[in-house]
Image (spheres, grey):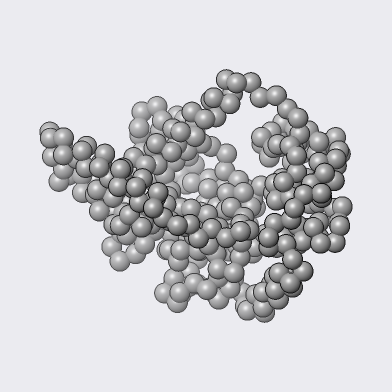
Amino acid sequence: MSLKTMLDGKLLPRMYEALSKVDFESRKFSNDIESAKRDILNDLAKRKSNRPLRIVGPSSIGGCLRKLFLARISARPSPKYIPIHKRFKSICIMETGTSMHLRWQAMLHVLGLLKDLSDIEVETNVKDTDLWGTADGRLTIGDEQYLLEAKSMASYLHRKEKNAGEARAGYREQYQIYCAGLNLVGTCYLFENKDNSEIQEFVDPLDLSFMEEAVARTIMLNEQEYAFWLDGSKHCPDKEGMDMSSYVCSGCDWAVDCFKGDTTAIEEARHGIPPAYITHEERERFRERENLRRRSGACASGARFKLDSKVASRLVRGRGKSSSARIRSNSSSG
């Protein structure tokens, strides 16, 4: 199914229909939004996370495996100087994105599209893998449920997405992992222009065709970590950036040592305390699970990721062409 045929959206038409019933002359809608924000924050503060000890974030699995490995073993970052104004700018960008997410979550909750507080900041895990993260929301549209992904971006990026007619590959592949973990039928992306609040929506149907690579990279990362702690291996995954100025490397804490070939930080990390899950018994259980998964059948059937029969059958009927794009980390803020 082409994304360009779905630009009328799933969410925005229903949102505007609900907004048509709002009395904008009164303060009630604005007051309801502020009240919903407080309710969301209070609910999040009370929740107990089910985050496992070992995770791989959907936003990072498409990045450099060496970077993920060095983070896993708590390697000392390369010495570098970051000017104060750049640190402050990064904080401002993050806070702007957090504020935008809360505003959208509150508005959609008031309008009845995020029905319950439990549908906001939803933890998701692709069963029997370490792929774990938190999604913006779980939308109920008719009798179907979609992932909500809201992003704010500068005008030039907003215009770029609009001209492309679809969400970029890095976004799409990342959020397919969330969809798989929550058994949803697709993702509704809301892209907001930071400069003028213009909104555009793209709808991305569930497609697991690229998941084999995500899971394979996760397995490779785990094996390297086990080998480091248990076998004294001196190897780590290859670097995936071409040079220091590439997007993959420009924000990496270990880029300087990486391109120098300096392994001092890795040797120092070996004297640290391994995580609780690093045991010979757990490695054997891990390998047994992987062998079972390899024998469990093709990803497209839905069996590998334990999708429910309704979602799996819809996937097989309408998945379209297999995506061959390599998983990449997304690069914009929000």
Q: Residue at x 43, y 38 (%)?
A: 98
**Left or right: residue 41 compared with residue 329:** left
Q: Residue at x 61, y 59 (%)?
A: 53
Can residue 12 be seen here? The reply is no
Q: Residue at x 28, y 50 (%)?
A: 109
**Left or right: residue 96 compared with residue 115:** right
The one of 1 and 78 positioned closer to us in this rendering: 78
Give x and y (percent) for residue 272: 77, 49
Q: How many numbered dots are placed on residues in this image?
A: 0
The one of 225 and 48 positioned closer to us in this rendering: 48
**Left or right: residue 280 compared with residue 48:** right
**Left or right: residue 70 compared with residue 169:** right
The one of 56 and 278 positioned closer to us in this rendering: 278
Please tell me whether residue 226 is drawn above or below residue 98 in the rendered image: below
Which quarter of the rendered picture does the N terminus lie within?
A: bottom left
Q: Residue at x 46, y 53 (%)?
A: 135
Give x and y (percent) for residue 276: 68, 60
Please tell me whether residue 134 is drawn above or below residue 194 in the rendered image: below
Please tell me whether residue 36 is drawn above or below residue 299 in the rendered image: above
Give x and y (percent) for residue 308: 45, 74
Can residue 195 be seen here? The reply is yes
Q: Based on the displayed image, in which of its 4 quarters is residue 155 positioned? A: top left
Give x and y (percent) for residue 83: 64, 21
The one of 306 and 49 positioned closer to us in this rendering: 49
